[in-house]
Image: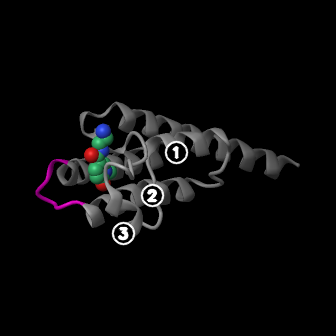
């Protein structure tokens, strides 16, 4: 009915915002550690310490497969990436700093796009 159609339209606008912000993070200079899943061969301890790995490519695939029902689900995976990063990396390291920079970029952009919709 009318209400359902409206909700569906909003939901798809939300996913458009999610796709946009993921594209921006993919292109960001500090996004390099997060583009693909962490390589367990390169970092054997990662699998042991990080229960739920996440990265931008995995998120792109989840978006494509319609696995995010709300913006909140999407934001939870982004924050998982940066929380994992803080768990596994010193703040004062290349990857650690990139994680803090990318988290800041995301949270600012996320608020901005929340208001415009
Ligand atoms: C997210 N993350 C990435 C790396 C990394 O070195 N990625 C390089 C990809 N070429 C190491 C630890 C970590 O937590």
Secondary structure beneath dot 3 equals helix
Q: Is residue 7 left or right of residue 114?
A: right
Question: Does 90 appear in magenta?
Answer: yes
Q: Which mark is residue 53?
A: 2
Q: Position of residue 113 (x, y in %)?
A: 44, 44
Q: CA distance from mark 3 to mark 2?
A: 10 Å
Query: Mark 2 or 1 closer to N-term?
Result: 2
Query: What range is drawn magenta here?
Result: 89-94
The reply to whether callout 2 and callout 1 are in contact (CB within 8 Å) is: yes
Q: Main secondary structure of the magenta part?
A: loop
Which residue appears farthest toward the left when viewing the image? 92
Quick one: SS at disc 2? loop
**Residue drawn 22% across the image and 47% down it:** 98
As drawn, is 79 to the left or to the right of 3?
left
First in sequence: mark 1 or mark 3? 3
Q: Disc 1, disc 3: CB below 8 Å? A: no
Which circle, 1 or 3, is nearer the viewer?
Answer: 3
Name the element at disc 1.
helix
Q: Which residue is mark 3?
A: 49
């Amino acid at each position: 009915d009318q209400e359902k159609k409206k909700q569906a339209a909003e939901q798809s606008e939300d996913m458009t915002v999610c796709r946009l912000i993921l594209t921006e993070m993919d292109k960001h200079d500090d996004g390099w550690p997060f583009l693909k899943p962490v390589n367990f061969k390169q970092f054997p301890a990662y699998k042991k310490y990080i229960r739920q790995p996440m990265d931008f490519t995995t998120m792109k695939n989840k978006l494509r497969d319609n696995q995010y029902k709300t913006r909140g689900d999407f934001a939870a995976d982004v924050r998982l990436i940066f929380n994992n990063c803080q768990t596994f990396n010193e703040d004062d390291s290349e990857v650690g700093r990139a994680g803090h920079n990318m988290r800041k970029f995301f949270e600012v952009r996320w608020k901005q796009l929340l208001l415009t919709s």
